[in-house]
Image: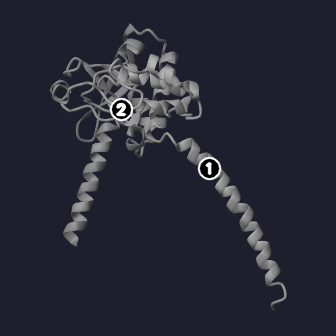
Amino acid sequence: MKKFVFALIAALGLAAGAHASEGGVAWDKAPVNTSDTASLQNGAKLFVNYCLNCHSAAFMRYNRLKDIGLSEQQIKDNLLFNTDKIGETMKSAIDPLQAKAWFGANPPDLTVIARSRAGSGGTGADYLYTFLRTFYRDDTKATGWNNLAFPSVGMPHALWQLQGERRAVFEARAGHEAVEHVFKGWEEISKGTMSAQQYDQAVGDLVNYLQWMGEPAQNTRVRVGVWVLMFLGVFTFIAWRLNAAFWKDVK
């Protein structure tokens, strides 16, 4: 039993250490609103154009996008590739073996990424929002890119043309055991096609879509839940008054 407890403590410690190594920066709050259909539609467009080339969403079907206000014809015209069909799942065409050779690992499926990446720093949406906004040029990495939220990530910056290129500025400080490099700010290399505000909004839309995709029925669940609570509240009051009436003559 003691061995099991010690093993569990060690495993938790390793997990915490791995999480800390990824959390190189505090997570920003993601502007998530899964009731905003315009944001979700723009996020779906960004996902198909920039993410689906490498990452799949194998548990999400294209026709489910009708839930965010898109017609079947709009999905076919704007979000489907020539070989895809409206009832198929969102699978990437990248070869897994080639992807592993290029990036060191096969890109993960993103269907529930917003739910799986939650941690002590915030929600999974907060992590993704921070991650997609903290890429920077790093010539020491194979892809030429690094990330503050996920140091030494194997993924290149897929949205760099929108955001532009920049370097991270670090300040060396003496720590307890070694020199620590503390992030100080950004140094712009080249401008992107979007302003900083436009890029943040676009990333917010993309993360909003990823949040919705992790549970497309969440808005329905919340709406039904409100009515269930109201129903229970009304009949709790009725039961309370009936109980009082039945027992009023009992001493």
Q: Check the picture and name the quadrant holding the N terminus.
A: bottom left
Crowding near pointer 2: few (<14 within 10 Å), some, many (20+)? many
Nearer the N terminus, badge 1 or badge 2? 2
Q: Is residue 26 something that shows in the picture? A: no
* Tag 1 residue: 224
Residue occupying image coordinates x 34% and y 25%:
52
Crowding near pointer 1: few (<14 within 10 Å), some, many (20+)? few
The one of 232 and 154 positioned closer to us in this rendering: 232
Residue occupying image coordinates x 41% and y 34%:
61
Residue 181 screen position, x and y as percent: 30, 29
* Tag 2 residue: 149
Comparing labels 1 and 2, the label whose residue is closer to the camera? 1
Q: Is residue 82 something that shows in the picture? A: yes
For badge 1, the amino acid type reads Val
Residue 25 screen position, x and y as percent: 38, 33
Q: CA distance from mark 1 to mark 2?
A: 36 Å
Secondary structure state at the residue bearing disc 2: loop
Residue 133 screen position, x and y as percent: 41, 24
